């Protein structure tokens, strides 16, 4: 596809379970971002991948959150031992370095019961 | 932390009215972007401004970047119901890190 895709679109899980969220960026985009958005609010930066450089993990809220990216392709965001406050929409975006425009996926809505 | 604050947080207006949304920070940004987000979707880029004092117009939308590159405004003329959505500003630093504002939820009533 031409755009950023994310899966699943919705995820309901029980407190304490681990979840994995997936992002497929636009082909050729070297930069990939993960954000968290709580209902009706702005975006909270989580992590940023740029090519083969070490990722910027400064936005991860706790050590329960981690993310990986294979080369310049798929990325997965993992949340371990989920808590109710993790409930939010998790958005992924990709961009071509030097252009700056981020293209967002539709997000994964995570609900922790 | 480079915090971007938007005001107002919520705005409900009648069709045909004008409005301005503000995005303010104490930090300097290399560029600033405005996005609009509709329910259930990711944000979509409206404009990028890069030069202090720059003004860009897109039909009924006018964007301005402050002279010091710390703040920006979005002005909508004759708002329409299709303008309804969450408006987000985002400042970019020299490392291509983006910092998003707190968002302005706009509702235009027909």
Image (cartoon, coloured by chain):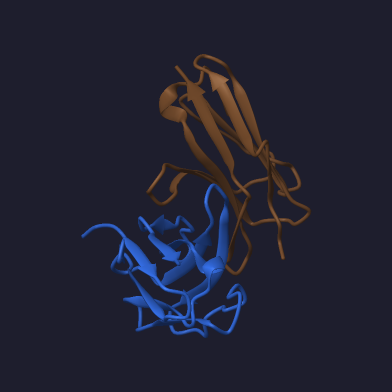
| A51 in relation to A29, above or below | below
Instruction: State the quadrant of the C terminus of chain B.
Output: top left
> Residue placed at 74% from the left, 42% from the top?
B67
Figure quadrant of the N terminus of chain B: bottom right
Q: Is residue A91 above or below residue B86?
A: below
Residue A10 position (above or below residue A41):
below
Q: Which residue lies furthest to the right in this view?
A: B26
Q: Quadrant of residue A101?
A: bottom left
For the residue pair A62 and B100, the one nearer the viewer reads as A62
Name the residue: 43% across, 61% down: A91
Q: Colour of chain A?
A: blue
Which quadrant of the structure image shows residue A70? Answer: bottom left
Q: The brown chain is which one?
A: B
Percent coordinates x, y for residue B98 in the rendering: 57, 61
Residue B77 visible in the displayed image: no
Q: Residue at x 56, y 16 (%)?
A: B17
Q: Nearer the viewer, residue B88 or A28?
A: B88
Image x and y of residue B83, in percent:
46, 29
Whole-percent x, y for residue A72 in the image: 35, 77
Q: Residue at x 38, y 59 (%)?
A: A107
């Amino acid at each position: 596809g031409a755009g950023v895709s994310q899966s699943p679109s919705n995820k309901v899980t029980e407190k304490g379970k681990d979840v994995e969220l997936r992002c497929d960026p636009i082909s050729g985009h070297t930069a990939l971002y993960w954000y968290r958005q709580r209902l009706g609010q702005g975006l909270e930066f989580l992590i940023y991948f740029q090519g083969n450089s070490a990722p910027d993990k400064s936005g991860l809220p706790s050590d329960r959150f981690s993310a990986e990216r294979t080369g310049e392709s798929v990325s997965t965001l993992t949340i371990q031992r989920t808590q109710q406050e993790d409930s939010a929409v998790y958005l992924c975006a990709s961009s071509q370095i030097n252009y700056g425009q981020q293209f967002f996926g539709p997000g994964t809505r995570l609900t922790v019961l | 932390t480079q915090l971007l604050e938007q005001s107002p947080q919520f705005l409900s207006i009648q069709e045909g009215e004008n409005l301005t949304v503000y995005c303010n920070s104490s930090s300097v940004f290399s560029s600033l972007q405005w996005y609009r987000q509709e329910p259930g979707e990711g944000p979509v880029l409206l404009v990028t401004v890069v030069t202090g004092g720059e003004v860009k117009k897109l039909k009924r939308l006018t964007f301005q970047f402050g002279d010091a590159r710390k703040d920006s405004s979005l002005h909508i003329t004759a708002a329409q119901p299709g303008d309804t959505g969450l408006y987000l500003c985002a400042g970019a630093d020299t490392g291509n890190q983006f910092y998003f504002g707190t968002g302005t939820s706009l509702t235009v009533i027909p």
